[in-house]
Amino acid sequence: MRRIVKGGRVVDPSQELDAEVDVLIEDGQVVRLDENIEATAEDQVTDATGLVVTPGLIDIHVHLREPGFEYKETVRSGLMSAAAGGFTAVACMANTSPINDHRSITELILGQAKRHPYARVYPLGAISKGMAGEELAAVGEMVEAGIVAISDDGLPVMNAALMRRALQYAQHYDLPVVQHAEDLNLTGDGVMHEGEWSTRLGLPGIPSLAEDVMVARDLLLSADTGGRYHVAHLSTGRSLEMVKEARRRGVRATCEVSPHHLLLSDQLVAESGFDTASKMKPPLRPQSDIDILRQGIVDGSIDAIASDHAPHHQDEKDVQFSMAPFGIVGLETTVSLCLDRLVGGGMIPLSRLIELLSTGPARVFNLPGGSLRPGRVADITLLDLDRQVTVQPDRFKSLANNTPFAGWQLRGAAVGTLLAGEPVALPEDE
Amino acid sequence: MSDEMVWRRKDLLGIADLSAQEILMLLDTAESFVEVAERPIKKVPTLRGRTVINLFFENSTRTRSSFELAEKRLSADSLNFSGSSSALSKGESLIDTARNLEAMSPDLVVIRHQHPGVPHLLSKRLESGIINAGDGAHEHPTQALLDAFTIRRHKGRIEGLKVTIIGDIEHSRVVRSNIHLLTKLGAEVTVAGPRTMMPEAIDKMGVAVAYDLATALHDADVVMMLRVQLERHQKTLFPSTKEYFDLFGLTPRRLQMAKDDAIVMHPGPMNRGVEISSAVADGQRSVILDQVANGVAVRMAVLYLLMSSRSGGTEVRP
Amino acid sequence: MTKTAGNQRFRYKRTVLDERDISRTIRRMAGQLIEQHDDLESLLLIGIHTRGVPLAERLRDEIQKLEGVEVALGTLDITLYRDDLSTIAPQPVIKGTQFPVVDLDDRVVVLADDVLYTGRTVRAALDELTDYGRPKAVRLAVLIDRGHRELPIQADVIGKTLPTARSETVEVAFKGTDGEDCVRLFERQSDGDAA
């Protein structure tokens, strides 16, 4: 069976392509990109006139919460949220309950994903058993079951000896070791970035050092072991500088940044009157960090933008700031935020954004996708650069609505996705 | 009448939100309530039939008593909830506690909580007016008002005074409210204490920072000592109370480094021999008990102004 | 000529008493007080803030001129005793209550106020007085009685009885507080009249 995506502007940084061409898909794979591909009577046609056609967007930092926390999010609701936000694939973190530290949990997640095929799921396995930070989890078995990376995300690997072993062992499977970089002793009981605003508000601070000390240690371990190291939700200027410097020395280090760390500063906690939607880990940082991260978005030193989609139930967030769980949802806001603020603002061209949201993430985790070259899987995202949207959390497909972006008016949105050449249709009533 | 201000706030959440003019209005109003305490019958019917709930999630005999007395002197009906007796200790969420209180239709809720921002959360959810009686290390607006009131009574002014605040700056809500208030009214504020108790970027709040007593006390008109929270910090922030006293304890000899007529203040309760020696606490320069007395008048003024702004004042009496 | 109070506008109608009228009226009121009280020494003249205070001072001065006796003078601020807290907008600065004597019990108190209207101010003043002691008697002297009482209260000494409509308002000015002696009548403008 053939499908032709007609009339769109194809932007594919993997082949440095930005042109008005049609995409011919056969048996779920891209076959040919060309001007005016003629459709026969049997061909199905997706009209992309006025739209941008990109390799399917991939969010490599998502919490799907299933198993264990289905009241926050399920694989089904999370994947609907991903599709609604323009993503064709997500990588989900291991801090479920039970923790994804053995193959049966990996299989359970992938089984649920198969039942709700709104987007692809690439699970991460835990680094340590029970995420207790002591002994290695059954990495090999989980690789057989389908994990693409390992991480104790939600918690850092505080134990340097364990981190060293993980970086050594993961090389047998060419897996990146993904670190939630945070020294918990330096964090203490901190709930927001330590600086002028934590001082003004009297809230315990999380110093930038908590991240920097960990990244510095891990880069040494990565250099020494040769292991692949990926910094999740990198948030400080100093950590980015260290990653760049290490990479110049040949260390196999990559990093991702979340949209909120590019767009919001720690002042929001005060401005919002202690709104718990401004509470996440790492915390929102000051403008000086934001400026350096944005430079990394421009100069290519950041490999991916990932949402760190962290759904929480409304009751959990509807408490005093200090008691609220960390995290915000991001699957349904990331694309519009990036189109409006990064591309629309003139910071980066559209092709660089697609690199950060598709090609880069695919490369970091060795995923299929991230490209529309002939022979690749036909996962596609359709963007309307002119569509005006208002962030309306009550209309999210996600079960959660904890976002600091409510009410933001943005220009540009994802308007559809195709998985293996088939348009993804979401149930209307949810 | 045209040059008189109108108090329009429903809540008193912190000093940070207030203008200098609003602060002065509160202080001036408090002046008239001092006189009530001198009357034979120390009670006026102003808030008769109004309900005030004192919701204290953290123990504070001093602040709660002061609010209670202020409420009684204004004839309000008051009701006390404390952390140990309220449902919160049984796992009820703050929002549910708040909703339950709301169902009782109080006019004002006075809230003390160990977490910053709790008064702000209540203010977003409740129709009642909210008075912040201390939220974590964030603000304690009525304390700063009574401190300023006391300073003004002794010095005749706030503007141009040098005020030094000494102690655990990082964990003190009193410091933050005082910094906002005193700098808004034109005082020059210096904070001093051990480096381990000095929060990041405190200078951005418009104060000078000192790490030794000689620098901090030099030329000071007002010396405000803070309580060292022994139970909380002894383990990590300084090695012993003796070392603290040696570095930062206020003794008569050290007080000589300040101006000759400098006054000594303390928000209480004091740790004698830790942050302040008894000779200073009980000495002639100490105005610590005045602070307590003024606290009632200041809180009466706050209750009065918040209550009178509540229904918007539609009728006009020229 | 218009004036505004709160969010309402008032239009000037006419002058009720000018400077000479006021002097004459106050002198007559003082005469009545003297007639009514044999023992002027036991009198305590208390002005109700704000314009009862200059009225009380003027009455004292006139009594002194006529009789050579200086009557004791006090002030009363009834703000904290009002029954309409919510309608005090803008909030007046509380000016304080002051008496020259500690014991009110054997005194005859004369409350002085500029305008007697609903009677609620006088009610509040009586409540407040009660908290200070038990005067032998309380009298009331007002410059203008404009009617529309909401409480059973009558003045013992009245400068001028002035029939008014509820839509009208009476403004009293004294030299000491306002720079001139004058009583004017204003009328509230309906929304349609507002410029």
Image (cartoon, grey):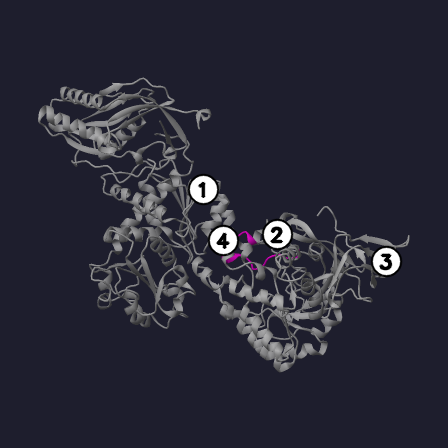
> Which residue is the site of mark 1?
B128
Q: Chain of mark 2?
A: A
Q: Do the residues at pointers 4 and 3 share their chain? A: yes
**Residue B211 pos. (x, y %):** 34, 69
> Alpha-carbon distance for marks 4 and 2?
20 Å
x and y, in percent, of residue A124 in the image: 68, 67
| Residue indicated by mark 2 | A401
Q: Dot 3 corresponds to which residue?
A: A37
How far apart are the alpha carbons under marks 3 and 2? 42 Å
Residue visible at 64% across and 79% down in the picture: A250
Q: Amino acid at mark 1?
A: Ser
Output the chain of dot 4. A
Please tell me which residue lies in front, B210 or A130: B210
Q: CA distance from mark 2 to mark 1?
A: 28 Å
Q: Can residue A355 be found in the magenta stretch?
A: no
| Residue at image point 36% right, 19% down | C165
